[in-house]
Image (cartoon, rainbow, N blue to C red):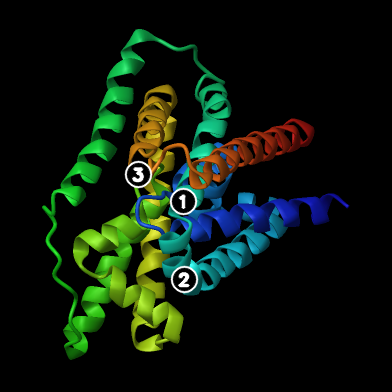
Amino acid sequence: MEKAKRGVLGFVYGLVYGVAHVVPGLSGGTFLVIFGCYDTVCEMFALNIKVIKKHRYFLLFLVLGTLGGVFGFAHAITYLLESFRIQINLFFMGLILGGIPLMAKIATEEEKFRPVCLLPFALGAALVASLFLAERSGAFGTGALQAHGVMFTVRIALYSIVAAVAMVMPGISGAFVLVALGAYDLFMEAIKALDFAVLAPAAAGILIGIVAGARLVLLVLKKARLIVYSAILGMVIGSVAPLFPGGLGPNMGTLTGALCLALGAGVAYFMGKMESKQKSGSR
């Protein structure tokens, strides 16, 4: 029964984590923090064998859920964002906002809040906001990655490494990084068409980037956990701004969007509580 529960949680977390990777502006790492499993997942991504063995069922279903989210949502993203952008954006905003109390609790598990934490919090929020504003202003351009033999494969791998590191960082969107690099459309088309000329080097780059990113996060968490989590909280809150949709007003879209916002907040709170209970029971 316990294995089944961990498997279900892992799959749901992975599904959300995967969906976040194909929607520019969403951060997969943010949702891992919201669900209260960020430290554990980072340990597994960093190839901590002891943690992998202990949480192997959770990891298996997390990976399956992630793949389901990426490949399943890649086909639906264009239609959904064009037809239901308000509802989808507000649902993900609800997920983020609903998880903030748990994030604050996790941040202060070992140390109490100190005024110095305001600086990394502000820097984290400013970083995400500046990336959002730069993208909106067209600072990254619109150039697309072109196919050119061996160098094309190398560039795919390198871009995937950079995006994968962002996948681990809360508040930073891996999909947004691909947009900035001019590779987002290429990656999405490769996922839809199962183009392994792109997917194979991308998979290799993602594995390298996730392991490297997770080890970097764990290193800084061990050095200054409260400061790092303060920056993470700032990045997470800053990531809400890009999701705020236009077109709100006295209309049905706003009403259904508000319901989606409440639903997202409820889901985040419920899933976070479940993860918190699971941690308490395993100690």
**Vertical relation: 174 (above or below) 75:** above
Query: Relative to residue 112, is residue 174 drawn left or right?
Result: left
**Vertical relation: 100 (above or below) 39:** above
The answer to which of 43 and 89 lies nearer the viewer is 89
Q: Amino acid at mark 1?
A: Gly
Residue beneath label 2, please? Answer: 74
Q: Amino acid at mark 2?
A: Ala
Estimate the spatial distance between the alpha carbons at disc 3 and disc 2, rounded to whole Å.
23 Å
Q: Residue at x 19, y 90 (%)?
A: 149
Q: Earlier in the sequence, mark 1 or mark 2?
A: 1
Query: Relative to residue 120, is residue 44 drawn left or right?
Result: right
Q: Residues within 10 Å of mark 1 (few under 14, many from 20)?
A: many
Residue beneath label 1, please? Answer: 28
The answer to which of 73 and 262 lies nearer the viewer is 262
Q: Amino acid at mark 3?
A: Gly
Q: Nearer the viewer, mark 3 or mark 2?
A: 3
Residue beneath label 3, please? Answer: 246
> Which type of secondary structure does the marked residue at label 3 adopt?
loop
In terms of image quadrants, where is residue 232?
top left
Q: Residues within 10 Å of mark 3 (few under 14, many from 20)?
A: few
Mark 1 and mark 3 in contact (Cβ < 8 Å)? Answer: no
> Which type of secondary structure does the marked residue at label 2 adopt?
helix
Question: Looking at the picture, how far across and down is residue 103, in whole percent?
Answer: 53, 29
Where's the C terminus, which quadrant? top right
Estimate the spatial distance between the alpha carbons at disc 3 and disc 1, rounded to whole Å.
23 Å
Q: Earlier in the sequence, mark 3 or mark 2?
A: 2
